[in-house]
């Protein structure tokens, strides 16, 4: 149990940028920060290394970001999987396998995400955006796709926390979410997959631009 708590808390600190890429963590420092013993922290650091969020060094670990080539590959994988899960969720809706409450909750999440993003609350917006897409993946009911997406999302999030920051992207992101939600609600599987893929690839394009061009 303590191992899981340590893993979750350290992962959260990495994903929200508290421990940014390049930061070195030792068992002693991490244990002090979490106010825990070194044993669960040691196991948590090993798990984070397996997740691809840190790499071991001579002393402790270092938080890592994907290099440009690997980041490009990660976006391609994410685009393919999100297209799959969006298409599957829309198919399940068309076949009457999604509860109305599921779509209502997704609608609410889209609205909150749009509001938070437009207000420029970056850390919250990133988390809500991820929750929106994760919920779609959950509605698809494909456990393997969801688990793989979680790992890819983590690696992308560490590498680029700024993809929702540019003001010009606020309306664009929200509009794509609306289109995706409409396609799933209407049971238009092919459209849902196409929109989801385009959304991810648009995010990739913005993420790799220099800040002054965003």
Image (tube, rainbow, N blue to C red):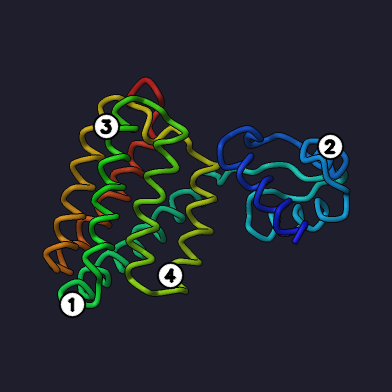
Q: Secondary structure at mark 3?
A: helix
Closer to us: mark 2 or mark 4? Answer: 2
The residue tagged 3 is 170
Eyeballing the image, is 14 above or below 150?
A: above
* Residue at the image point whose x is 50% and y is 59% from the top: 150
Q: Secondary structure at mark 1?
A: loop
Eyeballing the image, is 108 above or below 186?
A: above
Residue 76 placement: quadrant: bottom left
Return the disc, 2 or 4, that comes first in the chain's sequence: 2
In the picture, which quadrant includes the C terminus?
Answer: top left
The residue tagged 2 is 32
Along the line of sight, which residue is nearer the eye, 141 or 50? Answer: 141
Q: CA distance from mark 3 to mark 4?
A: 27 Å
The residue tagged 4 is 145
Residue 102 screen position, x and y as percent: 28, 63
**On residue 96, which mark appears?**
1
């Amino acid at each position: 149990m303590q191992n899981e708590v340590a893993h979750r808390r350290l992962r959260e600190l990495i994903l929200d940028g508290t421990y940014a890429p390049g930061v070195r963590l030792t068992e002693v420092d991490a244990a002090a920060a979490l106010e825990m013993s070194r044993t669960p922290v040691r196991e948590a650091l090993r798990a984070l290394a397996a997740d691809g969020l840190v790499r071991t060094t001579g002393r402790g670990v270092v938080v890592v970001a994907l290099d440009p080539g690997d980041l490009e590959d990660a976006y391609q994988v994410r685009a393919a999987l999100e297209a799959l899960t969006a298409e599957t969720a829309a198919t399940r809706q068309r076949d009457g396998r999604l509860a109305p409450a599921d779509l209502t909750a997704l609608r609410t999440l889209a609205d909150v995400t749009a509001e938070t993003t437009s207000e420029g609350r970056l850390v919250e917006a990133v988390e809500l955006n991820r929750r929106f897409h994760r919920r779609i993946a959950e509605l698809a009911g494909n456990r393997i796709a969801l688990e793989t997406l979680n790992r890819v999302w983590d690696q992308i999030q560490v590498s680029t926390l700024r993809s929702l920051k540019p003001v010009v992207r606020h309306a664009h992101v929200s509009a794509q979410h609306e289109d995706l939600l409409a396609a799933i609600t209407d049971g238009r599987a092919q459209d849902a997959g196409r929109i989801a893929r385009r959304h991810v690839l648009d995010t990739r394009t913005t993420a790799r631009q220099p800040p002054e061009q965003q």
